[in-house]
């Protein structure tokens, strides 16, 4: 078992096929050490500070940890010509202290594409990546992914999940931010489909999309702790949202305040737990408004009927007076 953080780190159900620690200083060395041909790759690969311009995607198919010599000073750049990192592995994979940028010309996962695996992104910055359809920054097709103390910003997707697209599996965001990402249709920050998503002391803000600018949850389960928020809108489609008590408004606000759609209509098939203020505003307030409208309409109807009755009474009185006036000359003639 290799040593992560100076101590043995166990991944239940997985094995680490590795052989110690090595240091690399250029892209070709990095690719060679990650693949290691037919041999066993190193357990920990330390990248010397600098920018690594990759000529093709870095394909990780074995358990490994890539760590920057100095966090934030090692950049993997695909120069907008391909994906930066691709992961498909049964062992544990960890990326630490890296900046991953410039991924492009991919349908899914411009920055990182995870087909399956037990993956940890620790103190990682995913920025300025793009995908033509889903997951500009990160695309998760399956597996267990933990994002810790990281930043996902400035990524774009042509359809869904500007920052993150999650098609299945489990995703945990811990002490991380998802901001400034965009998608053309759904989930500017995150898009989750039939997946489990948990936010712990994390924020999703300043993202844009036609629906679910903060997050679009489709048939999945989303959990937020009290220190997490999704702004300005979480669009929940037949899924569950559990956790943070939002301010309860259909307008942009904190927490789960965006459970109202952009059009102001309460989204159907919601199952929202422990969000009483949201329910009060999203359900009670519209009902009260409807009752007020009904009362106004009823008042108008009653007022019109009263005016009609008064008019009819007046006309009846005038008719009676005219009849008497005509009858008096006849009586005098007789």
Image (spheres, helix red, strand yellow):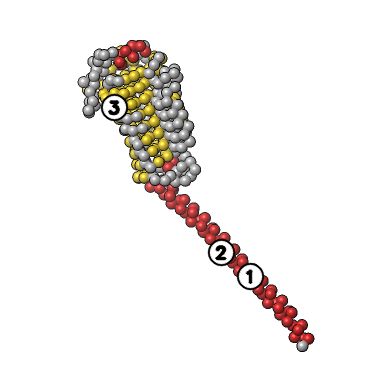
Q: Quadrant of residue 306?
A: bottom right
In the displayed structure, would residue 314 be above or below residue 259? below
Q: Residue at x 42, y 39 (%)?
A: 234
Front residue of 287/218: it is 218
Question: Helix or strand or loop: what does disc 1 sit on?
Answer: helix
Residue 38 seen from this side = yes
Residue 231 seen from this side = no
Circles 1, 3 touching at the beta carbon (< 8 Å)? no
Counting other residues with Cα less than 10 Å from the Cα at mark 2, is it few (<14), some (14-19), or many (20 or more)?
Answer: few
Q: Which residue is mark 3?
A: 118
Give how far across and how far down residue 271 sits, in percent. 36, 45
Quadrant containing the N terminus is top left
Mark sitting on residue 302? 2
- Distance between the Cα atoms at labels 1 and 2? 15 Å
Q: Which residue is mark 1?
A: 312
Question: Helix or strand or loop: what does disc 3 sit on?
Answer: strand
Question: Helix or strand or loop: what does disc 2 sit on?
Answer: helix
């Amino acid at each position: 078992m290799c040593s992560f953080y100076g101590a043995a780190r166990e991944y239940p159900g997985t094995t680490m096929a590795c052989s110690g620690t090595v240091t690399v200083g250029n892209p070709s060395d990095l690719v060679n050490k990650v693949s290691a041909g037919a041999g066993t790759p190193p357990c920990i690969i330390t990248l010397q500070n600098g920018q690594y311009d990759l000529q093709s995607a870095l394909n990780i198919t074995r358990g490994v940890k890539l760590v920057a010599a100095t966090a934030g000073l090692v950049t993997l750049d695909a120069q907008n010509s391909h994906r930066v990192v691709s992961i498909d592995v049964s062992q544990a994979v960890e990326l630490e202290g890296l900046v991953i940028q410039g991924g492009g010309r991919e349908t899914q996962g411009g920055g990182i594409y995870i087909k399956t695996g037990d993956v940890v992104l620790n103190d990682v910055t995913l920025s300025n990546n793009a995908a033509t359809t889903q997951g500009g920054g990160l695309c998760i097709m399956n597996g267990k992914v933990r994002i810790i103390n990281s930043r996902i910003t400035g990524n774009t997707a042509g359809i869904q999940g500007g920052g993150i697209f999650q098609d299945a599996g489990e995703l945990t965001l811990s002490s991380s931010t998802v901001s400034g990402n965009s998608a053309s249709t759904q989930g500017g920050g995150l898009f989750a489909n039939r997946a489990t998503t948990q936010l712990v002391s994390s924020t999703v803000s300043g993202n844009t999309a036609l629906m679910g600018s903060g997050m679009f949850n489709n048939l999945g389960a989303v959990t937020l702790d009290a220190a997490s928020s999704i702004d300005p809108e979480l669009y929940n489609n037949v899924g569950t949202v559990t956790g943070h008590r939002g301010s309860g408004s259909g307008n942009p606000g904190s927490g789960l305040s965006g459970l109202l759609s952009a059009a102001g209509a309460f989204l159907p098939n919601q199952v929202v737990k422990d969000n009483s203020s949201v329910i009060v505003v999203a359900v009670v307030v519209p009902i009260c408004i409807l009752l007020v409208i009904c009362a106004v309409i009823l008042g108008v109807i009653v007022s019109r009927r009263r005016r009609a009755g008064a008019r009819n009474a007046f006309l009846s009185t005038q008719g009676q007076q005219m009849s008497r006036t005509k009858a008096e000359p006849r009586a005098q003639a007789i």
